[in-house]
Amino acid sequence: MSIKSKVISVMMVMILVLSTSFIPGDSASAAEDLNEQDLQLIEILTAIENMPDEVIMQGEEAIKIYLENEVSFTLDLDERQGLAGVRKASIGSIAGCVGAVGTAIVINFTPAKILKIKSALKSVGGATKFVKAIKPYYQMSREDKLSKTASLKQAVRLAAKDAGPDAREALLDLFGVSSVIGSCSAAFGK
C-alpha cells in the first residue's frame, strides 16, 4: 500500500470517527422524551404503517379488527357513533386523537387511500419520528398565531417535509378529517 493510500485511509477513518461522535445520543432516551399519550399515538400510527395489504383490501371490518388487536389499549372504533362519538367522548386528549385517527382510517378512507397513508408513514421515517416532529411544529405554529387547523396542517407538512408530495398529501388527508383536527390539535397543545 502506498503512502498516499495510507494517508487517505487514515483521513477517512478520522472523518468517520469524528462524524459519528457528533451524532446526537438521544436515540437511547427517545422513549424518555415521550409521554404515555404520545406512545399511544405512535402505537396506532405504527399499526397503520405495518398493516398488511391483505387486511386493507378486505375492508372496514378487517381493518377495525386488525387495529383493535394491534394496540395495547382499548380502542373503541364504533362506526355507528362515527367520529363525533369519539370526539365527544374524549376531546382534548391524545386518547381522543388516537380514537379519531383509528376511526378515520376505518370509516373515512378507501383501501387505496389507506395504502397511501401507510406508505407515507414509512416515507417520513416511521410513526415515532413523525409524532416526535409534529408536536413541536404544531406548538411553533400556534405561537405564530395560526389557527388550530392551520397549525396542524403546517405541522404535518413540516414533519413530512422530507417525504414526497404524495406522502405529504396522504398525511394531510388523514390529519385533515375534522374530528382528527379537533382531537389532535387539542392533544398537541393550546
Image: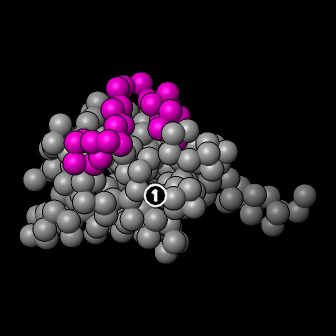
Judge whether residue 179 is colored magenta.
Answer: no
The answer to whether one can see residue 55 in this image is: yes
Q: Report which residue position mark 1 lands on.
A: 109
**Residue 102 in which image quadrant:** top left
- Residue extending farthest front: 80
Q: Residue at x 33, y 32 (%)?
A: 76
Residue 47 lies left or right of residue 16; in this view the side is: left
Residue 111 lies left or right of residue 178; in this view the side is: right
The answer to whether one can see residue 18 in this image is: no
Up the image or down, 17 lies above or below 35; here it is: below
SS for callout 1: loop
Q: Residue at x 15, y 42 (%)?
A: 88
Q: Residue at x 56, y 56 (%)?
A: 111
Query: Where residue 92 sits: x, y (%)?
Result: 14, 44
How many residues crowd around disc 1 within 10 Å: few (fewer than 14), some, or many (20 or more)?
Answer: some
Residue 109 lies left or right of residue 17; in this view the side is: left
The span shown in magenta is 63-86
Q: Residue at x 74, y 63 (%)?
A: 8
Judge whether residue 76 is colored magenta.
Answer: yes
> Front-most of 60 and 140?
60
Residue 38 lies left or right of residue 144; in this view the side is: right
| Amino acid, disc 1 | Phe
Q: How many numbered discs, if any?
A: 1
